[in-house]
Structure formats: structure tokens, C-alpha cells
Image (tube, rainbow, N blue to C red):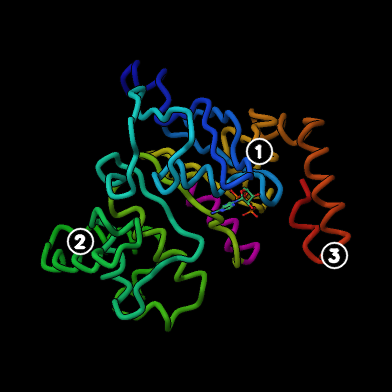
Amino acid sequence: MSEHENTVPLFSMSDVSVTFGGIQALSDVALDVGSRQVLGLIGPNGAGKTTLFNVACGFVRPDSGSLYLRGKRVERLRPHQLADHRISRTLQGLGLFDRMTVLENVMVGADRHAQTGFLSALAGVGHRDDARLVSRSRALLEELGIEAYADRLPTSLPYPIRKRVALARALVAEPELLLLDEPASGLSQEEMADLGTLIRGLTDRMSVMLVEHHMDLVMSVCDDVCVLDFGRVIARGAPDDVRRDPAVLAAYLGDEVEHRATEVGRCSRYAI
Ligand SMILES: Nc1ncnc2c1ncn2[C@@H]1O[C@H](COP(=O)(O)OP(=O)(O)OP(=O)(O)O)[C@@H](O)[C@H]1O
């Protein structure tokens, strides 16, 4: 790794603000994702995590602020340029194509439009004959322990397997920055522990930004954690420091109290 790679963050935001109508979704947000680091992005419901992800992959254009990749300012990040910038993301809704096999779904991830969910991603199946892409896709399925499902349709598979297919599809583009949106939702404790090992393993070749409500996972895999509340960064640092930060505890306590009043069953989701 060069000295430049060591010191310049792979991805940064500075002073990013986003409003939707009268709602301030992000206010002057700054963050860095270091090379080969896992940055966790947490915060109560409505804190701005999804909006921040959408800014990071060009789905939402900020009202103000700047994005930097490898130290260079990106003037206008557009979703179809993600692959060129070597950024991949997984979607909460998975977005798999029902009529394609698992292998084909993964191969489509190499197409530059696939990550935007455009139907034109279907054109990516033109890569089907590319032997190198086939072997790269198969190798990823193997790495994720799902090679046995290569010829199956996603709809016939359990949710945790489909989540891995979606992850393989994000990885086939060989990103340097992987954005993972709630990868642990719907997983058992054991599957979540496996996911944690897998995410740590990815840092030998990429950086990861992780939005996740499951604090056990966040605290165990992240090098750094950034906490949002009402669109502002209220804390940033090592997991152990962040979890003891009074501002963070207050934000989550407020959220928990609100949820207790409305939806008792979900409170444990916020325990940190
Ligand atoms: N397209 C939109 N139009 C209007 N308001 C929006 C839009 N997207 C987000 N918001 C608002 O912006 C704020 C931040 O929302 P965001 O979805 O980014 O939060 P979040 O931290 O991802 O929440 P959650 O954990 O519930 O997914 C919220 O007040 C939300 O209602």
C-alpha cells in the first residue's frame, strides 16, 4: 500500500446538506471512510442514514457540500458512474431479477447499470458468454458459500441465501467501496455472526460503509462508527467510545422511549 493510500481516505463527504421539502434530512455532514476500513453508520429512525447512502451513490444530489474519492472532488456523482468509481451497493429490497438464475443475477452486477436497478441492466446478460465473468461470479458464489444454488431462481431460495446473492452481485464489480444497507435484517444470530466474519474478510480488498440497526454486528465489525441524529453527526469514533458517548445514549434513549409508546416490540432493536 502506498503512503498516499494510507493517509488519504478512500471516500469523504464534507458539509453535506439535504432537504426534502421542509425536512432537513442531512445538515453539514462530514465523514471519512478510510482505506480498507469498515465504517458503521447508525442512528435512530429518520436520522438520515438512507439519505446519506443515497448521496454516497448519487441517488440523491445534496443541496450543498462536497464528495471526495481518493482525495479528488467528485463534481456530480451519478448512479450510472458508480462502477467507474468502483463503488457498489446492496439494496434493502435486494432487487434480484426473478427470472434469472442466481449465477446470471451475479453476472449482471458487472454491468455498469445494474446497481441503479435500471432495466437496462438486463443487457448485462450479454456478458453471459464471457468465460472470465462466469468464473469470477462462480468464485464469488463459492466464497459466499452459495455455489450450490448457481442454477436456481432466487424466488425458490430462502431469504438469507438471496441476501448473499445480492451481496455477490455487488462484489462482482470488484468495488473499492461497498455500501451495505441493513445486511443483517432477517438473519438469525448465527447467520449474523457469519456475516460479520464475511464483512471483516472483505477488508483485505475494499472499504465498507455499513448502515445497520443490529448493534452487536456494528460494534464487532466496524473500525469506526458515525452516529447521526436528526440529520447531524452527533458522534464519531471507535465503537467502544461511541457506545459510551452521552449524546449517543441520549439519542437512542429518546428513540427508545418514543418507540415504547408506539411499538413496544421493536425497542430491543435499539439497545446499545
Ligand atoms: N424522499 C423523501 N421525501 C421526503 N422526506 C424524506 C425523503 N426521504 C427521507 N425523508 C425524510 O428525511 C429524514 C431522514 O430519512 P432517512 O430515511 O434518511 O432516515 P434513516 O436514518 O435511514 O431512517 P430509518 O432508520 O428509519 O431507515 C426523515 O425525516 C425522512 O422522513
> Which residue is rendered at x = 30% and y = 59% of the image?
114
Mark 2: amino acid: Ser
For disc 1, does the CB lie below 8 Å from ligand 1?
A: yes
From the top left corner, tell me how far across and down residue 204 is, in percent: 39, 39
Q: Based on the displayed image, in which of its 4 quarters is residue 78 positioned? A: top left
Q: Which residue is mark 2?
A: 135
Q: Quadrant of residue 104?
A: bottom left
The secondary structure type at the circle numbered 3 is helix
The magenta stretch is 188-199
**Residue linked to disc 1:** 228
Residue 207 counted in the magenta span: no
Q: Which residue shows up at 65% across the image and 38% down it?
A: 228
Task: Give the quarter of the figure containing the C terminus.
Answer: top right
**Mark 2 → mark 1, Cα distance in angstroms:** 40 Å
| Place of residue 172 in the rendered image (x, y in percent of width and height, measured from the top left) | 29, 54
Disc 1 packing (10 Å; few <14; some 14–19; many ≥20): many
Toward the front, the furthest residue is 21
